[in-house]
Amino acid sequence: MQEDIILKEIEYKAVRSSGPGGQHANKTATKVELSFDISNSQGLSDEEKERLYKKLSGRINKDGILKMSSEDSRSQPANKEIVTANFLTEIKEALKRPKKRKRTKPTKASKIKRLKAKKRKSEIKANRKDPLK
């Protein structure tokens, strides 16, 4: 992932916000919408694009564009910073490779504990039976 290239490929759009700010928010475009075209990105390899499509499938539309927005602040530049930071963290998290699980054998203590629990359960069930039969 080449962050500087990706940041140049991002498109921003300012729209009216529904968040805090009262009349100020009603008159000015403070909400910032970010859109990023994953399929045409030069900053991502094909493998990274594939991983992003898998991990962020809920946020990507049918045209292959990732959309995010922020209306937390009353100022447009602050919202732009917030949405850019959220975008970068989201991309980095999606591109992380999960650690492979190392298979381990159960310990002797855990085996004994499991067998004791099974024995206890079977005794409880045995005590439910009618003693005359």
Image: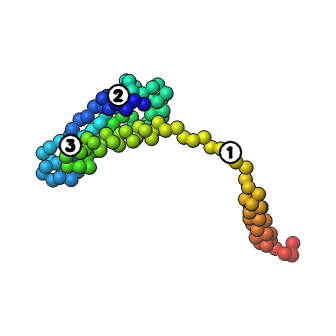
Please determine whether, in this image, residue 14 is positioned above or below residue 20.
Answer: above
Tell me how far mark 1 sits from mark 3, CA to CA.
50 Å
Percent from the top left, x then y, of residue 47?
49, 27
Q: Earlier in the sequence, mark 1 or mark 3?
A: 3
* Type of amino acid under label 2: Ile
Q: Is residue 89 left or right of residue 50?
A: left
Name the residue located 12 percent from the left edge and 45 percent from the top edge.
27
Q: Nearer the viewer, mark 1 or mark 2?
A: 2
Q: Earlier in the sequence, mark 2 or mark 3?
A: 2
Please determine whether, in this image, residue 72 is positioned above or below residue 57.
Answer: below
Circle 1 sits on which residue?
A: 103
Q: Is residue 42 left or right of residue 29?
A: right
Tell me how far mark 1 sits from mark 2, CA to CA.
40 Å
Q: Are marks 1 and 2 in contact (CB under 8 Å)?
A: no
Name the residue located 40 percent from the left edge and 41 percent from the top edge.
90
Q: Earlier in the sequence, mark 1 or mark 2?
A: 2
* Type of amino acid under label 1: Arg
Q: What element carries label 2?
A: helix
Direction right: furthest residue? 133
Q: What element carries label 3?
A: helix
In depth, the one of 8 and 53 nearer the eye is 8
Please determine whether, in this image, residue 101 is positioned above or below residue 13.
Answer: below
Circle 3 sits on which residue?
A: 76
Q: Which colour scheme is used?
A: rainbow
Percent from the top left, x then y, of residue 79?
25, 44
- Mark 3: few/some/many CA within 10 Å (<14, 14-19, 20+): many
* Type of amino acid under label 3: Gln
Tell me how far mark 2 sits from mark 3, CA to CA.
23 Å
